[in-house]
Image (tube, rainbow, N blue to C red):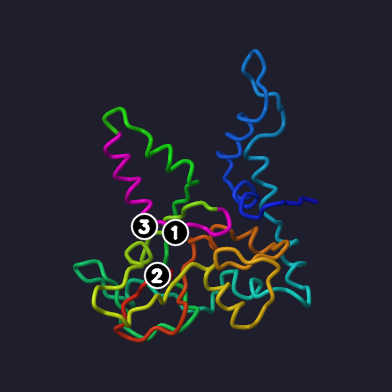
Amino acid sequence: MIACKSAATCNKEWYANAAQKEIDIKRRLRTRISEKSTLSYVDGAVLNQYTRAFPAAQTSFCRSPRAPLDCQLGMYNAETPMVTFKDVTVQEDGSVFAKSDIPKGAYIEAGQTLKFEESVVERIENTQSGVQSKYLSQFSEFFKSRSKRSSISGSLTLPSGIPLLVSDTPREGIAYETGNIGTLAAFIAQEKKIKGEVCKMEEEGLCHEAHNSVLDRHIVSYGGGMVVAMRNISQGERLLFAN
């Protein structure tokens, strides 16, 4: 059993990747005179395995009569429509518009995702010396401007495909433009509020259960690896990330 005093701090450490866990191990443990690790069978990769629930645990979790909406919405469904580049128009200024109606809950093709811990991005920003510092700075600015922060782990996820082009800023003078696509986590949180699911804790618009096996197995999808339509989107409407 694992108990956490602060969900925000706990989730950030629990869902950190193997590299970050390895850094934390070396920071917190004493090293030998030989500078070798005092641990023989535990490293960041081993600890990282504990954060991912086994398929059987997820199945058992979702069989509960009180199973949350995550069991319906948090896993890929082949029957859900997928919006690809054939279904949108990209203008010269980078704005993305729907060629046809997009139903609520449809997947927005995101492609491969790039995930970084915030501490890694900070290290890149602090790299001031060397020829590569200019390019690292440009990468850092681009990554931070386009990536989505996970409300669960605090990590930054940069999707490819259509979501990479979609802005979260309405055009000036067009008041009716509102966010119509969002991360899987934002969509599930929205649907839970609509259906009146009671959360034990709410943080940054995301509802947390004491334990959620679906979330454990699909943490990357929740944080930005999967993007969905937050509502019905009409033909000709501009795609915009919901804040």
Mark 1, residue position: 148
For marks 3 and 2, give the CA distance.
11 Å
**Which residue corresponds to the image point at 61% horizontal and 30% vertical from the top-left?**
27
Provide the residue span drawn in magenta: 133-153
**Which residue corresponds to the image point at 71% horizontal and 57% vertical from the top-left?**
54
**Which residue corresponds to the image point at 48% horizontal and 82% vertical from the top-left?**
104
Q: Is residue 144 above or below residue 82?
A: above
For marks 3 and 1, give the CA distance.
7 Å
Query: Is 176 inside the magenta-drawn segment?
Result: no
Residues at discs 1 and 2 in contact (Cβ within 8 Å)? yes
Mark 2, residue position: 241
| Label annotation for residue 126 | none
The 10 Å Cα crowd at callout 3, few under 14, some 14 to 19, many 20 or more, is some
The 10 Å Cα crowd at callout 2, few under 14, some 14 to 19, many 20 or more, is many
Quarter of the image that includes the C terminus:
bottom left
Residue 175: x and y in percent read: 30, 80
Residue 217: x and y in percent read: 64, 59
**Mark 1 or 2 closer to N-term?**
1
The 10 Å Cα crowd at callout 1, few under 14, some 14 to 19, many 20 or more, is many
Mark 3, residue position: 146
